[in-house]
Image (cartoon, rainbow, N blue to C red):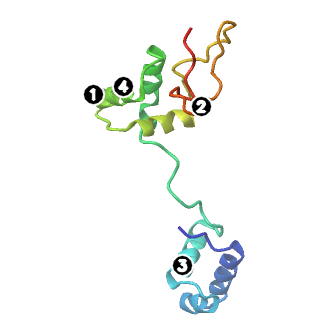
Amino acid sequence: MSRSLSSDLRSRVISAIEEGLSTREAARRFRIGIATAGSWYRRCRQTGETVARKQGQPSRSKLDPYEGFILGLIEDAPDMTLAEIAERLMSQHGVQVVGSTIWMFLDKRGITFKKRRRMPANSNAPMSCAPAGTGSTTSQTSTPLN
């Protein structure tokens, strides 16, 4: 999607049309599309707006009408997975969604849930081991068992 044209250009096109230039002549003079010049002038005449409107789709989710239901599910079972929430939405409301849609819905509201909190440091064993040496069959991310 391209950027909107400048407000200065819009004002000059609208002024030229108001001063008696035809829409086609104004479009040719300012090197813009005829339909563009016409829509700018019509909108200015109808609403008085001369600035560009926001481009793109509105930032809403198909889950917005079910916000109370989803938040209620999380409140009742805080460890519910995204797949389980999707199943409940399908069975109770007939809404088919994937986990990423639910995740974006929750992320927009600042709701996060870590399945497992980080464990406190253990005085007997470190939380993670040193990197495995050359030729070692141990994973670099594993923790030693005691």
Q: Residue at x 36, y 31 (%)?
A: 86
Pointer 2 residue: 110
Q: Residues within 10 Å of mark 3 (few under 14, many from 20)?
A: some
Residue underneath mark 3: 36
Which of 21/123 is in front?
A: 123
Q: What residue sits 42% from the left and 21% below the top? A: 80
Hey, what amino acid is under mark 4?
Answer: Glu
Q: Tell me, yes or no, whether the two marked residues, 2 and 3, touch with CB atoms within 8 Å.
A: no
The CA span between labels 2 and 3 is 40 Å
Q: Position of residue 61 (x, y in %)?
A: 46, 42
Q: Nearer the viewer, residue 2 or 69?
A: 2
Q: Is residue 18 left or right of residue 98?
A: right
Spatial distance from mark 1 to mark 4, Cα to Cα? 11 Å
Residue to which mark 4 is pinned: 84
Is the residue marked by circle 4 packed among few (<14), some (14-19), or many (20+) residues within 10 Å? few
> Residue shown at 46%/30% (left/top)?
67
Question: Whole-Å distance between the Cαs marked 3 and 4?
Answer: 48 Å
Q: Residue furthest right?
A: 8
In primary-sequence order, the first of circles 1 and 2 is 1
Q: Quadrant of the C terminus?
A: top right
Tell me which numbered mark, 3 or 4, is placed earlier along the sequence: 3
Q: Secondary structure at mark 3?
A: helix
